[in-house]
Amino acid sequence: MITVQNTISSSVGKVWELWISPKHIQNWNYAFEDWHTPYAENDLRENGQFKYKMEKKDKSEGFDFEGHYTKIEKFKLLEYKLSDGRTGSVHFEILGDKVKITERFEPNKQDSESMQKNWCQNVIDNFKKYVESI
């Protein structure tokens, strides 16, 4: 399993809403400045589907990040299964006036684990910047 995390200066309600809302996902879900998420859908319920289109801004590379939720505990936990069968989870931990987000997921076989960890850590870091800026 790969683990990435960050601690955000915000309420858990705001962190949760910005994590799950497609209009907000499109503003923070990228690992590098030349990437973006032009499309996001999220049906937040057990067995509900999610799909994020991630691509380079010049459209030279891209992929769909998609799957379904297997367990949801509001303000605490999202567990999911990706379309390729890998699983993952996002934990939300309240630390006073901050929220620690920890995401764990099974790596894919085609990319190095260090590349996948770096990519996802950058996404979590962008999420922190986004939440703390609005």
Image: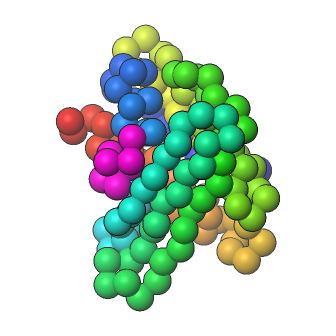
Residue extent of the magenta highlight: 21-28
Residue 95, how many percent across, how many down?
48, 16
Image quarter of the C terminus: top left
Nearer to the camera, 117 or 50:
50
Q: Residue at x 52, y 42 (%)?
A: 43
Residue 59 image offset from top left, x and y in percent: 37, 84
* 92 left or right of 71 in image: left
The x and y percentages for residue 5 are 54, 40
Farthest residue toward the left?
134
| Quarter holding residue 91 | top right
* Majority SS type along the magenta span: helix
Q: Is residue 69 left or right of residue 123?
A: right
| Residue displayed at 21% across by 38% down | 133
Name the residue nearer the viewer: 10 or 19: 19
Q: Note whether 66 is above or below 24 in the view shown.
A: below
Q: Is residue 117 magenta?
A: no
Q: Total of numbered circles in the picture?
A: 0
Q: Is residue 105 toward the left or the right of residue 57 in the image?
A: right
Query: Compared to 99, does 67 lie above or below?
Result: below
Residue occupying the point 57% across, 62% down = 65
Residue at point 48% right, 60% down? 52
Question: Is residue 122 visible in the rendered structure shown here?
Answer: no
